[in-house]
Image (cartoon, helix red, strand yellow):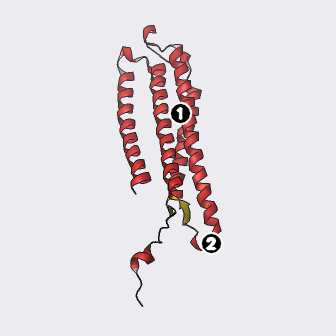
């Protein structure tokens, strides 16, 4: 009696584009958790964006205008919207996986999910997170100008912005490549 190990190790895929999954819920949990942390940062930013408290020790020409304060708030709201979009997609996918899991008590960690929905759902959630991070970074750029002074005056605001844009930008690039690979190549 010979058993084909390849067949025994992984369930056969069907022609309907469905695949068994057990790691997606963990990935979706991670997306939701990170989005929650960034959302908290947005609301902290709302509470700290007070133009009167900014620009301490700066020449009046280096202080940020009211328009920059408005841009901080607009970018934070847009960022919040993208994080909420991303989290809702991730929660919807988790709900679908958990509902399908509840139908088969023998396979509690493997749901038969449509691979098209899973791929594009994961990628859509990742895109929402990336855009949320991008707008959050823009709001922080403006927040730094409110607190430390405008870029035209040079110094610490420029150092803070360059450091943030390089580090966050490179990590977003890694995240984009990884999300694309996980969604469409794997």
Q: Position of residue 75 (x, y in %)?
A: 52, 27
x 46%, y 8%: residue:
60
Q: Is residue 23 above or below residue 127?
A: below
Instruction: Identify the image quadrant of residue 74.
Output: top right
Q: Could you tell me how far apart the alpha carbons at marks 2 and 1 are, in whole angstroms?
A: 39 Å
Q: Position of residue 69 (x, y in %)?
A: 53, 19
Q: Is residue 80 above or below residue 159?
A: below
Residue extending farthest to the bottom is: 1
x 62%, y 55%: residue:
95
**In this rendering, position of residue 168 left or right of residue 54:** left
Residue extending farthest to the top is: 60
x 37%, y 41%: residue:
173
Q: Quadrant of the C terminus?
A: bottom left
Secondary element at image label 1: helix
Instruction: Identify the image quadrant of residue 153.
Output: top left
Q: Which mark is residue 102?
A: none
Q: Are marks 2 and 1 in contact (CB under 8 Å)?
A: no
Q: Is residue 33 above or below residue 44?
A: below
- Which residue is identified by label 1? 79
- Which residue is identified by label 2? 105
User: Closer to the observer: label 2 or label 1?
Assistant: 2
Q: Is residue 111 above or below residue 82?
A: below
**Number of marks in the image?**
2
x 54%, y 14%: residue:
66
Earlier along the polypeptide chain: callout 2 or callout 1? 1
Q: Quadrant of the N terminus?
A: bottom left
Q: Position of residue 127 (x, y in %)?
A: 48, 42
């Amino acid at each position: 009696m010979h058993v084909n190990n390849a067949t025994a190790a992984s369930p056969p895929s069907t022609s309907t584009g469905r695949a068994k999954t057990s790691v997606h819920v963990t990935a979706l949990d991670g997306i939701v958790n990170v989005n929650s942390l960034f959302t908290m940062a947005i609301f902290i930013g709302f509470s700290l964006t007070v133009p009167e408290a900014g620009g301490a020790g700066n020449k009046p020409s280096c202080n940020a205008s009211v328009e920059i304060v408005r841009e901080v708030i607009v970018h934070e709201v847009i960022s919040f919207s993208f994080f909420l979009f991303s989290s809702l997609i991730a929660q919807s996918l988790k709900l679908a996986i958990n509902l399908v899991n509840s139908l088969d008590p023998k396979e509690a960690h493997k749901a038969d999910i449509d691979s098209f929905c899973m791929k594009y759902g994961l990628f859509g959630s990742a895109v929402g997170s990336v855009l949320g991070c991008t707008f959050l970074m823009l709001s922080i750029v403006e927040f730094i100008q409110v607190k430390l002074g405008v870029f035209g005056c040079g110094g610490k605001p420029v150092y803070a912005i360059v450091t943030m844009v390089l580090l966050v930008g490179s990590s977003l690039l890694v995240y984009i490549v990884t999300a694309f690979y996980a969604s469409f190549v794997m």
